[in-house]
Amino acid sequence: MSLPQNLRKKYLDQFDELVRKGEDILQGIKDIPYGGGIFGEERPRPWTQHETECHSRIQGWLINYNSLLDQIIPLNSTHRQLLIQEKPSWSYDGHLKNLVSRLKGLKDDFANGFLSDLSLQIEAEVAADYMGQAEQLLAEGQTGQYDHVPAAVLAGAVLEKGLRTLCDKQTPPIATTEGGKPLTMNPLIEKLKKAGLFNELKAKQLRAWADIRNAAAHGEFDNFARTDVESMIKGVNDFLATHMA
């Protein structure tokens, strides 16, 4: 299951923009003589206005660089471990150039789908297969009957499994049981929201889909309609594509 095209383009554009800004900063600092302090010397001389501006640009670039990495690279991935082994220091021998080069390599890996957690990708593919079955069940049903109920049950089960997987993948993992019993969907949603994976608006949508799944599983078929299940399937597909890519 891949990222939605608009989201994928957003990240690729951010890679390009950071590379462009990084190379622009490199042009600005290449003529700064050693001894200005901007390169981390022990006895810096007073900075010029140009050096102050370059230092400010570097700090801003670093924030954007780390923010992008936090969004696209799982904390426990090999890429992340390699990146944190060496702390960036703005030395004369060009650590900024190294970071820009790394960024270009990361963009290639991202574009080719090599940054994601492999186990998460496998589970996303399995989830996509089940969601395809849910879509087929809905398409084969007859409007006005309760034939949309199996699709709601299946989509809800896929969503619940996805929520549990997301909890397991956090650092540290989020508990999915309490007192030896599995947590239901609403507590899982709340825990993931508190962990910052999504906001309250998305949590509200997830709770609504959980309600549909519960109603379908408990025979409360009049509490939701075929159109609700149609929206649920589309929403669950989008949610999984965004968070399990």
Image (spheres, grey):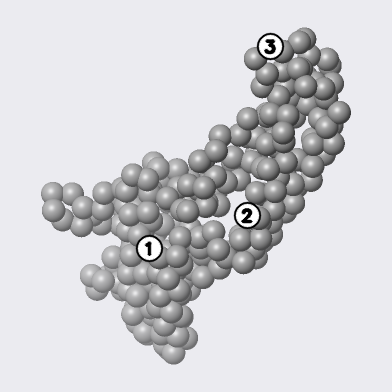
Does residue 4 appear in this view?
A: no
Does residue 68 appear in this view?
A: yes
Q: Residue 62 in the image: state x and y as whole percent.
A: 65, 35
Q: Residue 196 in the image: state x and y as whole percent.
A: 45, 43
Q: Name the image quarter holding residue 119.
A: bottom left
In the image shown, does 184 or 68 lie closer to the viewer? 68
Q: Which mark is residue 43?
A: 3
From the viewer's perspective, is residue 222 above or below residue 206? Answer: below
User: Considering the numbered disc 1 on the image, is that residue within a helix, a strand or a loop?
Assistant: helix
Label 2 vs label 3: CA separation? 35 Å
In the image shown, does 216 or 145 lie closer to the viewer? 216
From the viewer's perspective, is residue 38 above or below residue 149? Answer: above
**Which residue is depicted at the point 76% across and 10% down?**
45
The tag earlier along the polypeptide, 2 or 3, is 3
The amino acid type, in three-letter code, at marker 1 is Gly
- Provide the residue designation for mark 2: 106
Q: Which mark is residue 162?
A: 1
Q: Name the image quarter holding residue 168.
A: bottom left
Q: Residue 130 in the image: state x and y as whole percent.
A: 40, 78
User: Considering the numbered disc 2 on the image, is that residue within a helix, a strand or a loop?
Assistant: helix
Q: Mark 1 or mark 2: which is in front?
A: 2
**Which residue is depicted at the point 50% across and 41% down?**
85
Would you say 180 lies left or right of 228 here?
Answer: left
User: Considering the numbered disc 3 on the image, is that residue within a helix, a strand or a loop?
Assistant: loop
Label 1 vs label 2: CA separation? 26 Å
The amino acid type, in three-letter code, at marker 3 is Arg
**Which residue is depicted at the point 40% across and 75% down?**
126
